[in-house]
Amino acid sequence: MIRQAAGLAATLLMLGATQLRAQTDHLVPAPGYFSSYSYAPDYYARVQQTLLKGLADSPVLRIVVLPSFLPEYVISLEQQGQTYALQCVTARSSVWHALQTKAPAPVIVARHTAAISPAAARAVAAAFNAAIDQTHYPSPTDRRMVMDGVNYHFVSFRGGLGLREGTAHSPARGSNLALLVQLTDGLQQLALQSPDAPKEAELINLAESAAAKFTAAAPATAK
C-alpha cells in the first residue's frame, strides 16, 4: 500500500499536480536536463527518441505537446527548398506510462504529413517567433499551483540564433498564449487532413493576430 501510494505521488508530480503556473501571459524557459527533477531527463529523452526520430534537426517550427493523461505528440513545420510541409507524429500510447514498467517496450507512433503554403508557413512561424522573443522567467509572485493539464514546448528557428524554445502550461482562455494553442490545434488538424481543419486563410489570420498581440505586448526595450 505504501509503495502504491508513493508511486501515485510520483505520477501526480510528473503529471503536473504540483506544477507552478505563471499568471503572466508569456512563455517561460523550458527546463534543461540539469535543472529538472530526476525523472525528467529519462522522460524527455524517451519522448525525443519516440516522436522526433526522422524529423528535421532544424525545423522552421516544432511543437511538442505533453498532456497529463493522453498520448504525447509533436508537430514539425519543415522547409525543403521553396516548399513547406507539416509532420504530425503521435504516440499510440503514453510514453510516460510506458516508462513506469520495469522493461519499457517501444511506443508505436502514427505519422501524418501534409503540404502547407509558403504564406501560411511564414505567418505561423512569425507568430511563434514573436511569442518566443518574449520568453523569460516570471516573478515568484506571479506563480500559483495548478492541477494537471497540458505542457506545450514551442521551438522555432531564427537566423543568427538557431533553435529557441519556450514552454507554457495549459494557457488560460482569452490569453495571448491561448492563441498559440489554437494555432497548434489548427496545424494538427491540417497535418491529419481532418475535415475540421481550418482553411489556410483562417490560419493566416489567426497567426497574424497572434503575432500582432505578442509584438504589442513586448517590453519597449524589446521592440
Image: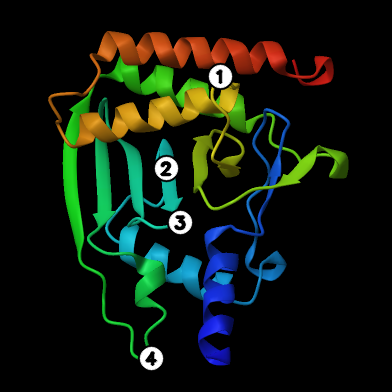
The disc at residue 68 is 3
Q: Residues within 10 Å of mark 2 (few under 14, many from 20)?
A: many
Mark 2 and mark 4 lie on one chain; the one further toward the N terminus is: 2
Between the residue at mark 2 and the residue at mark 1, the CA separation in whole angstroms equals 23 Å
The disc at residue 102 is 4
In the picture as drawn, the residue positioned furthest to the front comes out as: 1
Between the residue at mark 2 and the residue at mark 3, the CA separation in whole angstroms equals 20 Å
Whether residue 137 is visible, yes or no, is no
Mark 1 and mark 3 lie on one chain; the one further toward the N terminus is: 3
Check disc 2 and give the amino acid type.
Arg
Q: Residues within 10 Å of mark 3 (few under 14, many from 20)?
A: many
Check disc 1 and give the amino acid type.
Gly
Which circle, 2 or 4, is nearer the viewer? 4
Is mark 2 in CB contact (under 8 Å) with mark 3? no
Residue beneath disc 1: 174
Label 1's element?
loop
Residue beneath disc 2: 62
Which circle, 2 or 3, is nearer the viewer? 3
Whether residue 130 is visible, yes or no, is yes
Mark 2 and mark 1 lie on one chain; the one further toward the N terminus is: 2
User: Residue 30 at x, y = what percent?
Assistant: 63, 51
User: Residue 114 at x, y = what percent?
Assistant: 17, 33
Q: Residues within 10 Å of mark 1 (few under 14, many from 20)?
A: few
Is mark 2 in CB contact (under 8 Å) with mark 1? no
